[in-house]
Amino acid sequence: MRAGCAVRLCSTVLSVLFVILGQGSDVSDEGRCEGGVARCAEVDLVQDRYSTAGAMRAVVVREFGGPEVLKVEEVAVPQAQGKQVLIKVSAVGVNPVETYIRSGTHNIKPPLPWTPGNDAAGVVEEVGKEATKFKKGDRVFTKSTVTGAYAEYTVAEEDAAFRLTDRLSFQQGAAAGTPYMTAYRALFHRTHGKPGETVLVHGASGGVGLAAVQLAKARGMVVMGTAGSSEGMELVRKNGASHVFNHREEGYTDKIMAATAGVGVDLIIEMLANVNLEKDLELLARHGRVGVVGNRGPTEINARAAMTKETSIIGVMLYHMDAKELGETMSALYAGFTQGTLNPVVGKEYSLEQTPQAHKDIIETKSAMGKVVITI
């Protein structure tokens, strides 16, 4: 039964109680749901897509704003329909874009109330009547969800869920979707990286950055990375980078150019374009490409720097991946996850109740260390 029927359900229950108590049942639906026992309207569980079979904890946003608007509430467990699957969530990855949407500053503004999260990992609990890819008990991770992943259960379209190899934990599964798919798209679909080319991953110690380092290394590219701390630099080095630089040190770009014998790099995967894009254009070799994965504000560049070396600035958006690209991406990722060439790195873990702190930290932390994960 759907949440939209919550009031009618409460009315029916109260009608039975009135009959048992000998008080009749001539109370309107509206009257039954005003205060007291009948706080039924407050059980309007996030949207009209929920069943009333059981309750769960979920993070619910009822107004856009700071991290404090992320509230844990008890809501109904959603129901898988059609080609959907219901997943019992063990872990969920936190992405920076979710903080922008929550704040109301992103161009995407979901209808409220809203439960954030797309990168869930867990076990299939039930499948819709038309779903054929999975069965109850299968370990999966997702790239998107229908009902939001910051919850004990989530519903996803079966085509947005993927089998999680036994060699990866659920926490690693929560770091496998958006980071690796974004990195793959940036490296191979948008900037067309090739074996033997040199790639610089700016901000390489975070979830997407480490995924890019591993993928580029596996493809036979020469990998360079930057991080903001000695610990971050060591993490990037351990994951396959041949050269690592501290982007907080003065003159670090000179060191990058020296490492390329003054030629520059072929590709740059950029996580913070508003800070680094102008420098990126100076670091590129002739016909080099910058793949912009992340940006937090406007920036000014000298277009002549791009003209002189005929370089390209290329936007990257996972949303635009088509079915053919998705198939290629997931085949490559599954092979890497299974064979051990790709290993998602989990950073700090938070409980569901600590979600506001997770959102605060993911923006304020000066040097990321792996993927931020909420453990359910």
Image (tube, helix red, strand yellow):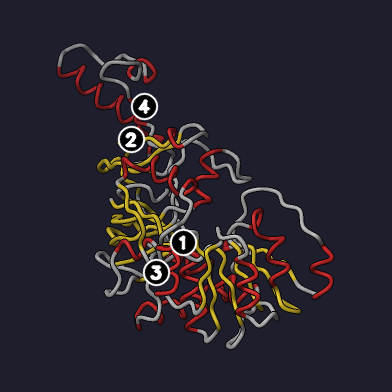
Task: Give the Cα separation between the discs numbered 4 and 3.
Answer: 35 Å
Residue of label 2: 73
* Residue 133 visible in the picture: yes
Please give left or right for residue 141 compared with residue 257 in the image: left
Residue of label 3: 162
Identify which residue, 121 or 55, lies in the foreground.
Answer: 121
Percent coordinates x, y for residue 318 in the rendering = 57, 63
Which numbered disc flags the more N-terminal residue, 2 or 3? Answer: 2
Displayed quadrant of residue 103:
top right
Q: Residues within 10 Å of mark 1 (few under 14, many from 20)?
A: many
Task: Give the Cα separation between the discs numbered 2 and 4.
Answer: 11 Å
Task: Give the Cα separation between the discs numbered 2 and 3.
Answer: 28 Å
Find residue 206 and name its label: 1
Task: Give the Cα separation between the discs numbered 4 and 1.
Answer: 39 Å
Q: Which amino acid does label 1 sit on?
A: Gly
Q: In this view, does 344 lie above or below 96?
A: below
Residue drawn at x 30%, y 71% is 168
Q: What residue type is labelled 2?
A: Glu
Residue of label 4: 42
Secondary structure of residue under mark 1: loop
* Residue 128 visible in the picture: no
Labelled pair 2, 3 in contact (Cβ < 8 Å): no
